[in-house]
Image (cartoon, rainbow, N blue to C red):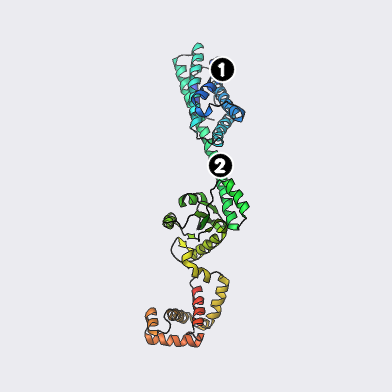
Amino acid sequence: MNVPDRPHLLALSSVRSNLVTGLRSILPEVGDEIIAAIRESVPEYARPLEGSFGRGVRAGVDEALTRFVDDIETPGADPGRWRTVYLELGRGEVRQGRTLDALLAAYRVGARVAWRRIAEAASAAGAGVEELTALAEAIFAYIDEISAISAEGYAAAHAEAAGEAQRRRELVVRLLIEGAGAEAVAQAVDAAGWRPPRSAAAVMTRDVQPGALATRLGSGVIAATLAEGVVCAVVPDADAPGRRSELASALAERPAAIGPTLELLAFGASEARARRTLELLEAGTISGSPALAADHLATLIVHDDPALLADHAARELAPLAGETELSRERLEATLRAWLDHPGRPTEVARAVHIHPQTARYRLRRLRDLLGEIDDPDRRFALALALRSRDR
């Protein structure tokens, strides 16, 4: 590793290597003093340094002192083990449920003790002002390097812990969607540390990190990525006053659908309805995001079986297939208007912007091709067929 990569080496370059023997002889007692000072000054480390925790702290102190003196004698030696020790100390703070503040405070305490004892030993060995200044600069630069490495380990462990927590939450979401039994859901909920609501609604969107979506949607929300980039969130109290407007605001940037609020173990039904609503929204069959499934029940019913609807449309509108494309478009537009204004050819003409006489002609043509278009059951069948063209 180059000197610029480890600033303390630059300071140590002006320290005589013949100081090493004297410094090395005091390292064990300096280590003991540092441990005692840390326990006295940092409340989080006041407990007996036993087990893996104690071994880790002792290893960190010993490695820091030994490596520092080694760098006077052999600058730039391989820092592999040195890095590993301080990465692991940073990771250990995450496992202990602490912030990094206590560890960094311990480093600062250690630096002060080390500087006092090393300065005493160096002075006794004949070090001048220049060397003492260099040693001081090196010690505190060294602590900065150690702190940065521990922060790296802390961040990595924190990310891993967050990832594991998210995986556990995603398992809960998938079990709810699959309709798993109460016991399996309860075990997953407990492992995830999630407080389950009595009821919840599914919110579906696409191409967003589930953790980010859950945070955006509010407290108590968990989410998971499903197939094809679809993300499903379990949203408690979705029907609470003002909650729908909050959800709309949080989802305003992307197409999204909201299923009905159901008991938690029935969440799979909410997810299925929200998923189908999202599909219809993305297909342009319905509009307005976020789309509430409850606002589009008729459309959901009509489009529940796309293949069946397509077969129905093909059968009902087959007589129009022999027309030219332009004629078919005009007749379908007239038929739509007739279904909206049955028995009122003048309103039909106004709706499609044609002369009433033209409207009557087209209606006669439709009767010739399609049969009794005045019968209520026939009108319903034709309306379903035309709705399939809205997909």
Residue furthest front as drawn:
198
310 or 324, nearer to the observer = 310
Say if residue 379 shows up in the picture. Answer: yes
Q: CA distance from mark 2 to mark 1?
A: 37 Å
Residue 203 percent location from the top left of the image: 50, 57
Say if residue 13 shows up in the picture. Answer: no
Q: Quadrant of the N terminus?
A: top right
Residue 227 percent location from the top left of the image: 57, 57
The residue shown at (48%, 16%) is: 119
296 or 324, nearer to the observer = 296
- Amino acid identity at mark 2: Ala
Question: In the image, is 189 to the left or to the right of 126?
Answer: right
Q: Mark 1: which secondary structure?
A: helix
Determine which residue is flagged by label 2.
Answer: 161
Q: Mark 2: which secondary structure?
A: helix
Residue 216 percent location from the top left of the image: 46, 51
N-term-proximal mark, 2 vs 1:
1
Determine contact: label 2, label 1, CB under 8 Å.
Answer: no
Q: Is residue 287 above or below residue 249?
A: below
Q: Which mark is residue 348?
A: none
- Amino acid identity at mark 1: Glu
Q: Is residue 65 above or below residue 311?
A: above
Determine which residue is flagged by label 1.
Answer: 29
Q: Is residue 233 above or below residue 85?
A: below
Residue 315 position by quadrant: bottom right
Q: Residues within 10 Å of mark 1 (few under 14, many from 20)?
A: few
Q: Residues within 10 Å of mark 2 (few under 14, many from 20)?
A: some
